[in-house]
């Protein structure tokens, strides 16, 4: 699949934003994060910015962005529509919870109801995002049970690393946030490793013989291409990345997305470092993870093969 930059920005930014929203709501309700006004302004401001940036960027991948509102009508059958409905609804409880926190300095009843709804809606939105891809039977690399959990783990990891950074910038206790970030990073790395292993060892279930129904006659090959020039389907669905480049990019995704953030976060938690060093290390962890997640998400699209490529010369998909 062709890695569209708008979709890469959407999945990485919104994932971090919803992960941050879920963790902030949960930890604040559990009494781990103090409901201080300027801390709330920073946390909710960053979360709303990332979520809104991601949702807006997703519309740039549409052929007719002005018709994006129609996606909300198919929530009974479409994971894309469900994601849009829940994502839009999340603004309501999140806005109320932020109002109680920032304006009234209060997250006790009835504001805590909005906090729990924010946490649940943020998690549900990320799950729906993962299911958009996991539900596509035409792309075997996505149509598997690891995709949706991977999106959740990445949201928790990126949201946890971001929360850890903000809390240290405000010189507030961040050990629990750092621990959650480490757990999310470890879960995301394990899930991603299993995902890569799955797509590397999976047998090719879709072939040109199966697609044409001519397998009983032997090997099927194309006599000539169906089009004289590249078309939209070939550009969007027929993108391929060389194996040697994929291996190199996987290494960079693991290094920047998991190894360095884990090392930096562990360093801060293990040592009683100064405030300045803690801030610098947490910023390094977030910056490294942001780079790694962009590489990981680019590979997620680039390594996927649509079965329609069988009609354009591919032997397997």
Image (cartoon, rainbow, N blue to C red):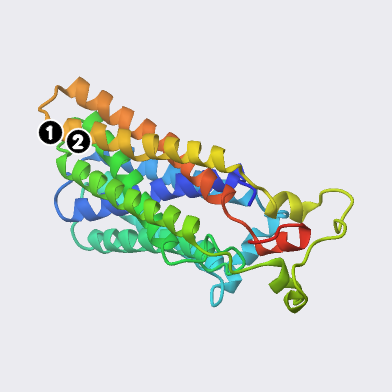
Residue 165 lies, with reference to residue 13, above or below; the image says above
In screen coordinates, is 264 left or right of 88?
A: left
Q: Which mark is residue 202?
A: none
In screen coordinates, is 26 left or right of 69?
A: left
Q: Quadrant of residue 264?
A: top left
Q: Quadrant of residue 261?
A: top left
* Mark 2: secondary structure: helix
Q: Which mark is residue 266?
A: 2
Q: Residue at x 22, y 48 (%)?
A: 180
Q: Which mark is residue 270?
A: 1
Residue sticking out furthest to the left? 272
User: Taking the image as drawn, is residue 47 in sight?
Assistant: yes
Residue 286 lies, with reference to residue 240, above or below; the image says above
* Mark 1: secondary structure: helix
Q: CA distance from mark 1 to mark 2?
A: 6 Å
Q: Residue at x 28, y 58 (%)?
A: 115
Residue 119 lies, with reference to residue 283, above or below; the image says below
Q: Residue at x 58, y 64 (%)?
A: 204
**Rendered location of residue 127, percent (x, y):** 42, 62
Cβ atoms at labels 1 and 2 below 8 Å apart: yes
Local crowd at mark 1 within 10 Å, few (<14), some, or many (≥20)? few
User: Taking the image as drawn, is residue 38 in sight?
Assistant: no
In screen coordinates, is 244 left or right of 258?
A: right
**Rendered location of residue 277, percent (x, y):** 21, 21
**Rendered location of residue 139, percent (x, y):** 59, 63
Give the total number of marks visible in the rendering: 2
Q: Nearer the viewer, residue 201 or 227?
A: 201
Q: Nearer the viewer, residue 159 or 70?
A: 159
Q: Nearer the viewer, residue 135 or 218?
A: 218
**Rendered location of residue 213, percent (x, y):** 75, 77
């Amino acid at each position: 699949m062709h890695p569209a930059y708008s979709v890469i920005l959407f999945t990485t930014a919104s994932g971090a934003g919803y992960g941050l929203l879920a963790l902030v709501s949960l930890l604040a309700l559990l009494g781990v994060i103090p409901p201080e006004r300027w801390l709330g302004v920073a946390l909710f401001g960053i979360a709303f910015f990332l979520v809104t940036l991601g949702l807006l960027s997703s519309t740039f991948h549409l052929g007719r962005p002005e018709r994006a509102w129609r996606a909300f009508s198919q929530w009974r059958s479409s994971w894309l529509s469900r994601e849009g409905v829940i994502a839009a609804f999340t603004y309501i409880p999140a806005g109320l919870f932020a109002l109680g926190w920032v304006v009234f300095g209060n997250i006790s009843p009835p504001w805590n109801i909005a906090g729990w709804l924010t946490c649940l809606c943020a998690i549900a939105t990320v799950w729906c995002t993962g299911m958009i891809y996991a539900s596509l039977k035409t792309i075997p690399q996505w149509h598997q049970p690891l995709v949706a959990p991977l999106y959740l783990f990445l949201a928790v990891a990126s949201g946890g690393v971001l929360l850890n950074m903000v809390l240290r910038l405000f010189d507030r206790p961040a050990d629990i946030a750092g621990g959650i970030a480490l757990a999310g990073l470890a879960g995301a790395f394990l899930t991603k490793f299993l995902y890569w292993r799955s797509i590397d060892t999976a047998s090719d279930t879709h072939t040109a013989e199966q697609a044409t129904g001519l397998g009983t006659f032997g090997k099927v090959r194309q006599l000539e291409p169906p089009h004289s020039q590249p078309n939209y389907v070939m550009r969007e669905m027929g993108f391929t990345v060389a194996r040697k480049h994929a291996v190199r990019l996987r290494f960079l995704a693991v290094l920047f997305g998991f190894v360095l953030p884990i090392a930096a976060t562990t360093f801060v938690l293990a040592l009683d470092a100064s405030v300045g060093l803690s801030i610098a290390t947490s910023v390094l962890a977030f910056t490294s993870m942001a780079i790694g997640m962009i590489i990981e998400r680019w590979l997620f699209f680039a390594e996927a093969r649509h079965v329609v490529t069988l009609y354009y010369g591919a032997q397997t998909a």
